Image (spheres, helix red, strand yellow):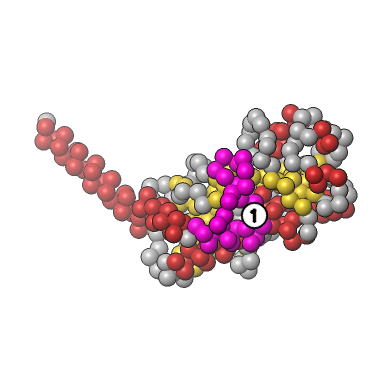
Amino acid sequence: MHGLIRALAAALVLGAGAANAQVADLVSQSAFRVCADPANAPMSTREGTGFENRIAELMASAQNLPLEYTWFPQVTGFIRNTLQAGRCDVVIGYAQGHELVLNTNHYYTSTHVLVSRNDDPLAEVDRLSDPALQGHRLGVVAGSPPASHLARYGLIGRAKGYDLMVDRRVENPAADMLDDLEAGEIDLAILWGPIGGPMAKERGLKVTPLLHETGGPRLFYRITMGVRAGETVWKNQLNSLIRRNQAEIDRILLDAGVPLVDDYGTQLKVVN
């Protein structure tokens, strides 16, 4: 009986070792293979113009490896058809704590922002609870955290909603929202900072990070790189690369117009 138990235990250990080896073997040793959306400007584009493209180039260069992409729209099935299928090894931008991936350490934290016309009185607003917003039409992504805050403050009734999950190859809700802002169809736009910040910078619009909201849901998120479950060694390698290249990552993000905040979303990050 004891012999049988020892044999079963040994088989379990060997089986676990084989499974771990198979997972580790999925990570390419000859290229830095990135899973990305081909039309997700300002983050990633097939042409390589997004800030996530620049971060991917930095990470590949730091390993002396060529950069290779697997392109797939970030809609339902993105992780299943890219990372989990073994076609690529890392998603550059992924919110911390998402169950579909194993997260690296976060390499930046950002928050939702208000985007306004520079000459508009609402350009001075820095929180959704400001009474100055009453009676105005705000643009917000339907189902996003800021929409819950607008409902709390009685602002959702006049708000204009924009789609959350779309194929960016054929739809661009953020650009539509900013077009409406410039045309006067809405008075203020509310967007996720890494999208709204760079897009507003290109258009010369004012960006105000939302740093003073109370109550849930929170408006800031820590952004990581995502790898397959079980790939702890690969995750640790990426953590080391992030740590050694953090200053350059910060420069890429700030140059793009991404608002960087502290880990608690209460103030802008001080970057040396």
Quadrant position of residue 211: top right
**Which residue sits at x=37%, y=49%?**
232
Residue 33: image location, x then y, percent: 47, 63
Give the vertical position of 71 relative to 15 (above or below).
below
- Which one is in front, 122 or 112? 122
Q: Is residue 180 left or right of residue 76?
A: right
| Image quadrant where one finds the C terminus | bottom right
State whether residue 89 appears in this view: no
State whether residue 270 appears in this view: yes
What is the secondary structure assignment of the residue under circle 1?
Answer: loop
**Which residue sits at x=72%, y=47%?**
208
Give the vertical position of 264 relative to 87 (above or below).
above
Q: Which residues are magenta?
A: 246-272
**Which residue sits at x=61%, y=50%?**
260
- Which one is in front, 37 or 270? 270
- Which one is in front, 211 or 7? 211
Give the vertical position of 39 relative to 267 (above or below).
below
Q: Is residue 96 left or right of residue 201?
A: left
Quadrant position of residue 138: top right
Residue 28: image location, x then y, percent: 40, 63
Q: Amino acid at mark 1?
A: Val
- In the rendered image, residue 135 lying in the magenta stretch gets the answer no
- Which one is in front, 4 or 16? 16
| Image quadrant where one finds the N terminus | top left
Q: Residues within 10 Å of mark 1 (few under 14, many from 20)?
A: many
**Which residue sits at x=65%, y=60%?**
256
Residue at numbered disc 1? 258
- In the rendered image, residue 257 lying in the magenta stretch gets the answer yes
Residue 98: image location, x then y, percent: 52, 42
Question: How many numbered badges does the structure rendering display?
Answer: 1
